[in-house]
Amino acid sequence: MKDLCHRAEESTLEPGSADHEKWQGKKLDEMRNFTAFLLMGFSDDPLLQKVYAMVFSLVYLAALTGNLLIIALTTADQHLQSPLYFFLKNLSFIDTCYISVTVPKSIMNSLTNIYSISFLGCAMQVFFLFFLCGTEYALLLVMSYDRYAAICHPLHYEVLMNRGSCVQMVMASWLGGCIYGALHTAGTFSVSFCETNKVSQFFCEVPSLLKLACSGETVLENGLIIASSVVVLVCFIAMLVSYVHIFSTVLKILSSKGRVKSLSTCLPHIAVVTLFLFSGFLTYVAENFVTSSLLKSLTSLLYTVLPPTVNPVIYSLRNQELQAALRNMIAGKCLGFSF
C-alpha cells in the first residue's frame, strides 16, 4: 500500500521539477533511516533457537539469584555495612541491570521467532549498555582506591572512606556512566543507515550497527570510541599504580597471616577487573579479526553475560563474612519457619 501511494505521488510530479527532486530526497531519507532493526541472533534453526533460549534462561536466572542475594545480604546484615560491601552492593545492582538489557529480549526473540527491535528500543539498548558498562568500570576504579586506602593508610581509612565520600564516589560513577552512555548513543544514531537493517548480533551492538551506516558518517562515533579507549587506559594505569602500592605495603607486613588476610580482600577485585577487561578485549579482537557472525555473537557473550554471572561467585567464593551472613539468613528463615 505504501508503495502504491509513493507511485501515485510520483506520477503527479513532473520529472526534473523542484518538487520531484524534493520528493526523491524525501524518499531517499526514508530508505536510509530504518524504523526497526532485525537481530539475527545465533541461528535460523528453530530447534537451536529453543536451546539457546533455555540456556540463556538458566544463565539469566543464575545471574539474578547471585546478584540479588548479595544485595539482600549486604543490606540486611549489620556486619556487612563497611564501604567494601557498600560498593559491592552497587556492583551487584549494576550487574543485575546490565544482564537484563540484552538477555530477556534475546530469550523472547528465540521463543517467539520475532527478531525485530524498534529504532527506539535499539537506541535504549545502546544507551543502557554503555551507561552500565561505564558505571561499572568507574565503580571498579573506586573499589581499587578503597583497597588502597584500607591497606596503605589504615589509620586514616575511616576518614578517607567515610559514608559521605563513599556516596559521592558512587554518585560520580553513575553520573559518569550516564554521560558516557548518552555520548555513545548520540554518536551511534547520528548517522544515516544505508545498508540492510539486519544486525548480525543478538542485541544492538555498536560495531554491528556502524557497519550499516552510510559511508563516511561514522567519524563522530569512531572518535568517541578512541577517546573512551584513552580514558579506559588512564583508569587502568591508576588501578595498576594503586596495586603497586598495595603489594609493596603487603610485603612489608611481618606476619604471614596478616599478608594473606590483606591479599584476600584484593584478589576478588583483581579477578573481577581482569574478567571485565579481558572479555571486552576478546570481543574487540573478534569484531575486527573474526569473520564468522556466530563466533562474533558467542564472543559478545563474554562481556554481556559472563561478568554479571561470575562476579557474585568471585566475591563470595572465599569471603567468610558473606558466607557467614548467608548461613545466618538461612538459619533465621529455618527457625522462623519452624515456629
Image: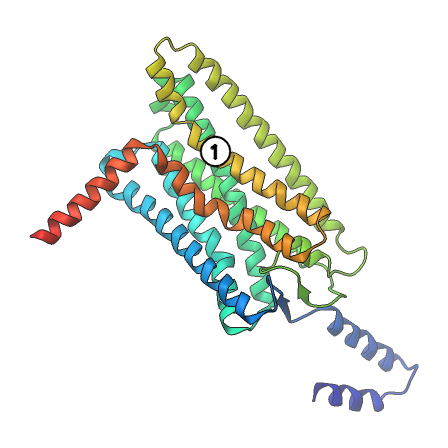
Residue 127: quadrant of the picture: bottom right
Total numbered circles: 1
- Is residue 120 at least partly visible in the picture? yes
**Front position in the image: 292 or 288:** 292
Horizontal relation, residue 196 to residue 216: left or right: left
- Residue 121 versus residue 145 in the image, above or below: below
> Which part of the image, by quadrant, shows the N terminus?
bottom right
Name the spot of residue 109 as percent of width and height, x first: 53, 68
Residue 277, percent across and down? 57, 38
Q: Residue at x 9, y 52 (%)?
A: 338
The residue sitting at 73% across, 68% down in the picture is: 196
The foreground one among 226 and 51 is 51
Q: Kindly give the residue lying farthest to the front in the view shown.
A: 47
User: Residue 199 location, x and y as percent?
Assistant: 66, 63
Q: Residue furthest left?
A: 339
Taking 228 as reference, is 97 above or below it? below
Decide: few, some or many residues near mark 1? Use Cα within 10 Å; few <14, some 14-19, many ≥20: few
Q: Tell me the residue that label 1 is attached to.
A: 271
Could you tell me residue 226's position as x and y percent?
70, 41
Q: Is residue 179 above or below residue 18?
A: above
What kind of residue is marked 1? Ala
Residue at 52 percent across and 19 percent down: it is 244
